[in-house]
Image (cartoon, rainbow, N blue to C red):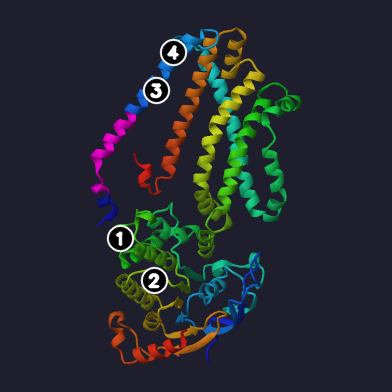
Amino acid sequence: MTTTQSALDYAEQAPIKWRQYAVTIGRIGLGVLLLVAWKIGADVAGPVFAADPIKVAQRIVEDAASGALLRHVYVTLRLATIGFAIGCVFGVALPFLLRLLPRLTNAVEPYIMASVGVPKYALVPLFILWSGIDDAPKLWLVGLLVFYPVFIAVFAGIRNVDRRLINMARVVGASEAAISREVVWNSLLPFFFASLKIALPRAVSAAIIGEFLVGNEGLGYLIEYSRQNFDTTGVFAGVVVATALVLVINAVLVRLDRRLSAWRPTDRDMQL
Amino acid sequence: MAAEPLLEVRDLSKRFAARAGRDAPAWVIQDLSFSVHDGEFLTIIGPSGSGKTTLLNMIAQIDTASGGAVRFQSQSAPIGDPKALNPGLSCKIGYVTQEDNLLPWRTMLQNVLFPLRVQGRLNDKTRAHAETLIRAVGLQGFEQHYPHELSGGMRKRAALIRTLVYDPPVILMDEPFGALDAQTRTQLQEDLLRLWDLGRKTIIFVTHDIAEAVALGDRTLVLSRAPAQIAGEHVITIPRPRDIRGIMTHPDFSPLYQRIRAQVQ
């Protein structure tokens, strides 16, 4: 009886599997190619300007073995996570609040949009002035840089919710809170996840930049400290670890998105 | 008329707000009056764009009227202020809309149970009732399917029983079977009549299909082109229970059909 199930059974499995292999092989090949290019580039540029990838790998292994790297990663990750959480909470809560107050929304919208244009990194001296040189100014920076993409996406998502679904929910007796939770929240999830894909790497970048400027721990500090000591290999090692960090976070995010949007139909262009 | 009508529409008028770059808005509905009695199956027929959906939206309090009154159980709907509306009148009026409006991220079963869940009435008894309804319209086996995995007819049936499941005393239906093939449509009409025979709710059923209006209703109202007014009223004398497939051969059918057709422009 289950029509869709049998339709899936008919789908041609073999060519899809072959295509997946082709993609995987292509991916690995491209990675090797990039590494070779890096190696050649490093040899041409010399050790002051570009680090040898093999030495970078050795450095990462050494630092990891000593436990120092883990400590730096932990500090940066902690900063990025807390700042990210703060930015996310405000970025999601504010649009929901504004939904209930349409007149206020219209009044403040131009100011919010104008504040998007303020260069956040330029505000760091102010944050230091206001809140000292501990975690606080860095959290301000991370929080703000996460807040904007999340806020803008969730705001757009809320405006995009199908009015007919909201009317349906109202007619069957759903409270405004239930409508927010069920209809609005689920409708804007794709927008929210799209914004997270921008916000999460930003959170890590902002944490690292914050550490360039203040503090004596974290990946940003590691990179900046290495630069001051003309340790190009150290700089490259820091960048590689930071990139790996963002990739891992992204992979977790993609997983979560896939789980939460399992209901969505897949287009033929979205399959491999 | 003996008893007080359950629902009364009196001199109802509606026009939508003006938009820049368009002419002043025309009246969609003007001075429309009719009433509906408890347990009645009223069908309303009218050409496309005659304000049928707008009328139902105002009865369901999704939209406000520009003038006149809609009274349900002697209570008037607020006029002019959308914030004062009470959509569905505290679950007393169910509304099966033209689009199925199923939640795409919920399975068919979750969609059907949605009203019970938000009303806090989800328990073993109501759940069993939902399962009975799912079987009654032939959706068993598709409980875990998402709306996009169901056919158009199945989605319509799911939307129909989503309203039946919480048992509102009045149900509005807006061309619920409009986009379906003749076979599925007949099937659903039979389902609807069978369910109606079990519960005898008050139904206001909007359609543009004359045969459907005659086959289902106790009474049929014909709306004129916009601005909508009542162009005719017909009591459907065909006795119940009715056989949908054979109804065209009933001696009363053809004269009714002809008279209504003369009024629908």
**Residue drawn 58% across and 76% down?**
B28
Badge 4 marks a residue whose secondary structure is helix
Q: Nearer the viewer, residue B184 or B93?
A: B184
Chain at numbered mark 3: A
Quadrant housing the C terminus of chain A: top left
Chain at numbered mark 2: B
Badge 3 marks a residue whose secondary structure is helix
The residue most toward the front is: A44
Query: How far apart in space, not on screen, are marks 4 and 1 (Cα)?
Result: 62 Å
Residue under circle 4?
A39
Amino acid type of disc 2?
A: Phe
Marks 4/3 same chain: yes
Quadrant housing the N terminus of chain A: bottom left
Number of the label disc, if any, that sits on residue B140? 1
Please give the range of residues in magenta: A8-24
Q: Are marks 3 and 1 in contact (CB under 8 Å)?
A: no
Which numbered disc, 2 or 4, marks the residue closer to the eye? 4
Amino acid type of disc 4?
A: Lys
> What is the x, y in percent for residue B181?
33, 70
Number of the label disc, if any, that sits on residue A31? 3
> What is the x, y in percent for residue A165?
50, 59
Marks 1/2 same chain: yes
Amino acid type of disc 1?
A: Gln
Which numbered disc, 4 or 1, marks the residue closer to the eye? 4
Residue under circle 2?
B177
**Residue drawn 50% across and 63% down?**
A168
Callout 1 environment at 10 Å: few (<14), some (14 to 19), or many (20+)?
A: some
Number of the label disc, if any, that sits on residue B93? none
Which numbered disc, 3 or 1, marks the residue closer to the eye? 3
Residue A62 seen by the camera: no
